[in-house]
Amino acid sequence: MDNTADDPILPRAKPAFDQDPHRVRELSERNLEMAIGRSVRAFRRAQGMTVADLAGVTGLSIGMLSKIENGITSPSLTTLQILSHAFSTPVTSFFRGFEERREVQHVKAGDHIEIERRGTRAGHQYHLLGHIGSNDSGVLVEPYLITLTTESDTFPAFQHDGIELLYMLEGEVEYRHGDQLFHLKPGDSLFFDADAQHGPEVLVKLPARYLSIISYKQA
């Protein structure tokens, strides 16, 4: 007897992600340990030394050095002084990563910058919503608010490095990516490899506005 029809329908499991956006950052003491550890590792690698090499030069054990580099233990001032002599760098250099200023930008409504990009020649209005240059993440991000009006032309042939996310705010467009066409309405998003040709092919309902967020590796 087949009881398949009587089996309960189990809810689909949600995908799990490595990063928890709601995770509370560790206490500042542990953040300091992690910053020192990253600095020690960076200095060691810059001088082409292995952990064993550094242990031989400083007299510190490989296990202790590993704990320092991974932020598991807090090195004493004496240990930091030994490491500073080994790297020929001031003790204060180990704290730079902790003290580094983290950039943030607040762009109020109407204060965004209209810029020239290839799309502006087709009547696409590009407004840059913020810019943070070279940073520790190794990634650059360009957030734009793009507006298409009756004066805009279709242009499905954009092509550039990086990954791009579109989020529709107003209007409707048929947006091409490679050999696929997507009908985008308010609330829809499109996330894609920007190395393929892409762009709005049919302007269905105007005006159309969408966020475009492009991310790519730092040069």
Image: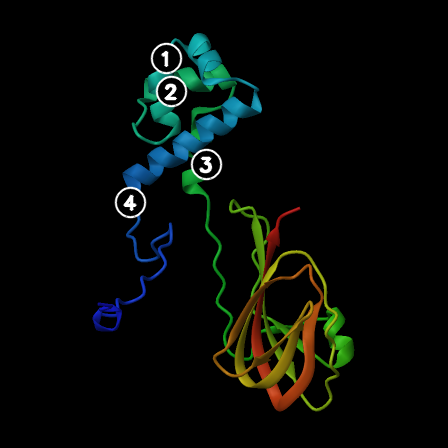
Three-letter code for the amino acid on which mark 1 is drawn: Leu
Query: Contact, CB < 8 Å: mark 2 with mark 1?
Result: yes
* Mark sitting on residue 216: none
Q: CA distance from mark 3 to mark 1?
A: 23 Å
Q: Is residue 207 visible?
A: yes
Mark 3 and mark 1 lie on one chain; the one further toward the N terminus is 1
> Is label 4 in a helix, a strand or a loop?
loop
Q: Which residue is mark 4?
A: 26
Q: Which residue is mark 3?
A: 96
Crowd tier of the residue under label 3, counting other residues whose Cα lies within 10 Å: few below 14, some 14–19, many 20 or above:
few
Which residue sits at x=51%, y=70%?
Answer: 107
Crowd tier of the residue under label 1, counting other residues whose Cα lies within 10 Å: few below 14, some 14–19, many 20 or above:
some
Task: Give x and y (percent) for residue 19.
Answer: 37, 51
Q: CA distance from mark 4 to mark 1?
A: 27 Å
Judge from the rendering whether residue 28 lies leftward or rightward of residue 129; answer left or right.
left
Three-letter code for the amino acid on which mark 2 is drawn: Leu
* Mark sitting on residue 60: 1
> Is label 2 in a helix, a strand or a loop?
helix
Judge from the rendering whether residue 134 lies leftward or rightward of residue 72; answer left or right.
right
Crowd tier of the residue under label 4, counting other residues whose Cα lies within 10 Å: few below 14, some 14–19, many 20 or above:
few
Q: Which residue is mark 2?
A: 65
Mark 4 and mark 3 lie on one chain; the one further toward the N terminus is 4
> Is label 1 in a helix, a strand or a loop?
loop
Looking at the image, is 139 positioned above or below residue 115? above
Looking at the image, is 34 positioned above or below residue 5? above
Which residue sits at x=30%, y=28%?
Answer: 74
Mark 2 and mark 4 lie on one chain; the one further toward the N terminus is 4
> Is label 3 in a helix, a strand or a loop?
helix
